[in-house]
Amino acid sequence: MLFRTVWLYAWFALLVLCVVAMFDVSEQTCQGHVPILLSRALTTDPWRGWILAFNLLAVGSSFYLNSIVMVTGFLGFLCAFLVSMFQTNAHNALILVSAACIMYETYPTKAHNWWRIHWWATLVDGVVCSVWLLFSQYGCTTDECSECSWWYISEYLFFWSMFLLVFWVIPRTEQLRDNIQFVDSEQDGETDFKPNSTNKPETTLFF
């Protein structure tokens, strides 16, 4: 199957997961279906397990993009949901670094208007999200202001839009396969690894 098609399916799954988690956790936090901090929703059981599984698949799939920065970004998101956001600043640091990695690697290097519009719109939304998160942390005077607000939609849109940016980086003809061959470039492309079936297409990753 085309990698781009799989990525779109994964994006829709992520959207549904975030919305369902928000509806469930916001009922407990805000006594109503009001947007809350996305990390709060996704680090609450059982949704933490689902987002960890999702990020694990994203890390594995990102190897096909042949970018250590992209792999680092998704690995950072995986680690961010492993730690507790309520007891340490590690969660925020991992989210910040991971988002920076994804935004850096998805910067539109080709003259594709829709890609450029998408990237800059994501950046603007990220700035709006950051301003609101800082205000909710240091400017809100009540728990209701910091925990439940429609401004958190900016965080959801940024997270979804950033994940969808990877779609533009994926080559149009890239196939998602389960047979990855690692090659040592110092050996002129030769490797001791032999696939079980010679009829199975191979994907080569250079390190």
Image (tube, grey):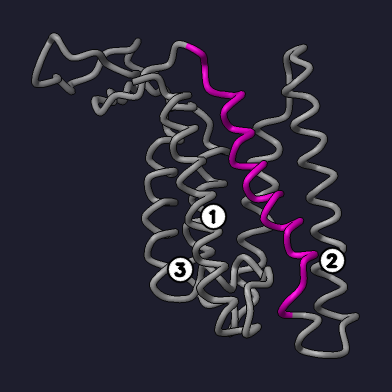
Most extreme residue toward the left is 196
Mark 2, other Cα within 10 Å: few <14 / some 14–19 / many ≥20: some
Mark linked to residue 76: 1
The residue shown at (87%, 80%) is 138
Q: Position of residue 62 (x, y in %)?
A: 46, 35
Which secondary structure is most common in the magenta stretch?
Answer: helix
Q: Position of residue 150 (x, y in %)?
A: 77, 66
Contact (Cβ within 8 Å) of mark 2 with mark 3: no
Quarter of the image with the N terminus is top left
Residue range of the region highlighted in magenta in the rendering: 147-172
Amino acid type at mark 1: Gly
Compared to 94, does 200 lie above or below? above
The Cα atoms of the two marked residues, 2 and 3, are separated by 24 Å
The Cα atoms of the two marked residues, 2 and 1, are separated by 23 Å
The earlier-in-sequence mark between 2 and 1 is 1
Residue with the mark numbered 2: 132
Amino acid type at mark 2: Trp
Left or right: 33, with 120 as reference point: left
The earlier-in-sequence mark between 1 and 3 is 1
Q: Quadrant of residue 200?
A: top left
